[in-house]
Amino acid sequence: MFEKLKADYLQSLVLKNYSPLSVRQMGQSLRIFLFWAKAHGIETPADVETATFENYKAYLSTGYVSRKGGQLAVGTIITRLFNVQNWFDWMKRKGVIYANPTAAVQLPKTVKRLPHGVLRPDEIRLVMAQPNIRTLLGYRDRTMMEVLYATGLRAAELMALKVADMDLKRKVLRVRHGKGGKDRFAPLSTPCCRFLDRYLSEIRPELLKDLRPYGNNWAAKTGTGGDFVFVSIYGGPFSSTWLGEIMRRYLLKAGITRPVSPVHGFRHSVATHLLENGMDVRYVQVLLGHENINSTQIYTHVERATLQRRLKECHPRELMRNQVKPYVEERIKTDAVAA
C-alpha cells in the first residue's frame, strides 16, 4: 500500500510541474522512511502515530549513517522529515487517512552557519584560467565557469539550461524549474555572453558530433544532448555530479586546497562579491532565486571581514596606528602615587 501511495504522490508532483531534482529528492526521503518503517513492522499509513514519527526523527538524528560514514546534517534531517510530513498531508487531503500523525512532530532547529568556501576575486580569475580554451572541452568548461560566476546558478540549474533559454542580445538567460519549481531570469555579464556566443555557434555543434565513440555505454549516450546548452564529449547531457568533479579538478589545479564546494562555491562567491561592492541585498536575492530574503542575509555576515579590512584601510585612527603610543611610563607613575 505504501509503495502505491508513494508512486501516486510523486506522480502528482510531476503533474504540478515540480523539477525532476525535487521529485527525486522527495522520492529519496520517502524511500528511507519506508525502509525504516518496514524494519519496524509498519505496513500502512494507519500504523503510523505521532510517537512513531518521533522515533523516526530520533533515528535520523542518532542512528542513521550516511554514505560517508557520518551522521546527517541538521538541514538534511529537516528535509527528510519535512518531505514525509508533506506526503502524509497529501494522504489526508486524498482521504487515505483522517488526520496527519506527523504534523505534531516539531522539526529540529537549524543553526545558521556562514557559507564556507568563498573564493576571492583573484582566486576566481585563477580558476577560470585553468581550462585550455584552445580545446573543445576546455572552452566548454570555461564557458560554464563564466555562466556560474555571472549568474550564481545551482549545478542542477546549469545542467538543465536549454538553448532556447539563452538571449544573448538582451544578455539574459531563463532558469526553468529552479528550486521550488519556480522560473526566473538571470542577467549575463559581457564576457559571459562572448564566451556563450562562440560556444553555441562553434563548440557545441562539434561536441554534438560525438567525439568519443567508445567508453561505458557510449552508443546510448551518443547524440542525446538534444537542446541542452552544455553537453559531454559523447554529445549527450552530463550530471551535476560529473560537473562537480570537473570543477574540483580545476580548483586543485589552481592550487586551492581548502574546503570549497566545486560548483556552489561560485554561487557563494558571486553573492559575496556583489554585496561587498555595494549591491542591495534584495537584488542579490532575486539573482540567486531565494524565496526568502533570510536565505540571502547570510551573505551579509561574510561582509564583516571585508568591513574590518576596509576599516583598517580607511579609518583615520587606524591609519595612525603606528604613530600613536600609550604613555606607559606616565601611567605607571600615576598608579604608584595613587597607591
Image: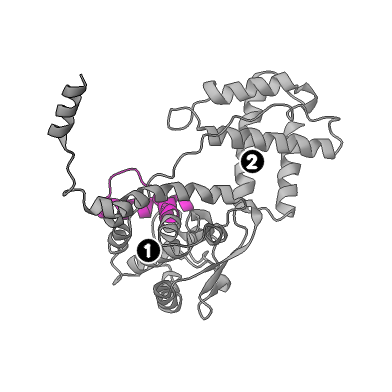
Q: Determine which quarter of the picture holds residue 140.
A: bottom left
- Residue 223, given in percent of the width and then of the height, sits at 50, 67
Q: Magenta region, mostly helix, strand or loop?
A: helix
Is residue 58 inside the magenta stretch?
no
The reply to whether the C-beta atoms of the residues labelled 1 and 2 are less than 8 Å apart is no
Judge whether 73 appears above or below 228 on screen: above
Observer-nearest residue: 7 or 26? 26
**Picture coordinates of residue 22 (x, y %)?**
62, 48
Q: Residue 256: within the magenta?
A: yes
Residue, disc 2: 27
The segment highlighted magenta reads 240-269
Name the quadrant of the N terminus. top right
**Disc 2 on helix, strand or loop?**
helix
Left or right, residue 2 beside residue 160: right
Tell me where residue 287 appears, x and y as whole percent. Answer: 54, 61
The spot of residue 113 in percent (x, y) is: 46, 39
Residue visible at 37% across and 63% down in the picture:
141
Q: Residue furthest left?
A: 329
From this viewpoint, is residue 322 visible?
Answer: yes
Q: CA distance from mark 1 to mark 2?
A: 31 Å
Mark positioned earlier in the residue sequence (1 or 2) = 2
Q: Residue at x 83, y 29 (%)?
A: 99
Q: Of residues 274 and 188, which is closer to you in this image?
A: 274
- Amino acid type at image mark 2: Gly
Q: Residue furthest bottom?
A: 169
Determine the secondary structure under disc 1: helix
Residue found at the very far front of the displayed protein: 337
Quarter of the image with the C terminus is top left
Of residue 70 and residue 36, the one placed in the foreground of this image is 70
Residue 141, label in figure: 1
